[in-house]
């Protein structure tokens, strides 16, 4: 299961509040594609399947489908807001190769 850093948890909470919808969860998924074989997908979701893996970080619920969970085991979602780097980033110890854009891995 993917972990959230404190800064990512704070930013996700802000974004969920801005959405204004009850029952939202952050879905993190791994999709086939990208220049290295897989790419990450993140979005707010209210459609939670029975076999989804769930983890709570305060008021934030993160859901991952079983296939993605295998590729995200031990990964961390972080958020940076600085001059050199801004946005969400996934640090995934399972990735053996990443592309230059940082959005796909194998």
Image: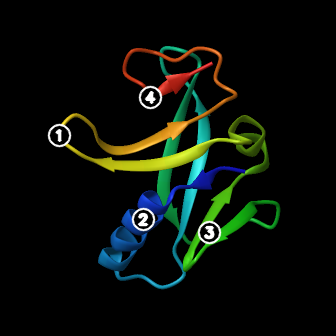
Residue at x-position 54% and y-position 15%:
36
* Residues at circles 3 and 4 in contact by the CB criterion of under 8 Å: no
Q: Nearer the viewer, mark 1 or mark 4?
A: 1
Distance from Cα at disc 2 to Cα at disc 3: 18 Å
Question: Of marks 4 and 2, which one's residue comes earlier in the chain?
Answer: 2
Image location (x, y in percent) of residue 22:
48, 85
In the shown orientation, is residue 88 left or right of residue 61? left
Cα–Cα span, label 4 and label 2: 19 Å
Residue drawn at 72 percent across, 65 percent down: 54
Find disc 2 in the rendering and name its residue.
12
- The answer to whether residue 66 is left or right of residue 17 is right
**Which residue in the protein does label 1 denote?**
83
Closer to the eye: label 2 or 3: 2
Q: Residue at x 39, y 50 (%)?
A: 79
Mark 2: give few (<14), some (14-19) or many (20+) Cα within 10 Å. Answer: many
Instruction: Report which residue position mark 4 lands on.
Output: 103
Measure how far apart labels 3 and 1 are at the Cα level: 36 Å
Q: Secondary structure at mark 2?
A: helix
The structure residue drawn at horizontal position 74% and vertical position 42%, both measured from the top left corner, is 73
Which residue position is annotated with label 3? Answer: 47
Instruction: State which tag comes first along the sequence, 3 or 1.
Output: 3
- Mark toward the viewer: 3 or 1: 1
Q: Tell me whether the residue at label 3 lies in contact with that at label 1, contact meaning CB atoms closer than 8 angstroms.
A: no
């Amino acid at each position: 299961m993917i972990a959230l850093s404190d800064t990512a948890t704070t930013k996700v909470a802000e974004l969920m509040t801005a959405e204004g919808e009850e029952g939202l969860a952050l879905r993190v998924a791994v999709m086939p594609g990208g220049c290295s074989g897989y790419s990450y997908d993140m979005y707010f979701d209210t459609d939670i399947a029975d076999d989804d893996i769930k983890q709570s970080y305060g008021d934030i619920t993160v859901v991952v489908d079983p296939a993605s969970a295998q590729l995200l085991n031990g990964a961390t979602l972080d958020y940076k807001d600085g001059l050199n780097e801004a946005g969400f980033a996934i640090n995934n110890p399972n990735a053996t190769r990443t592309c230059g854009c940082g959005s796909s891995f194998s």
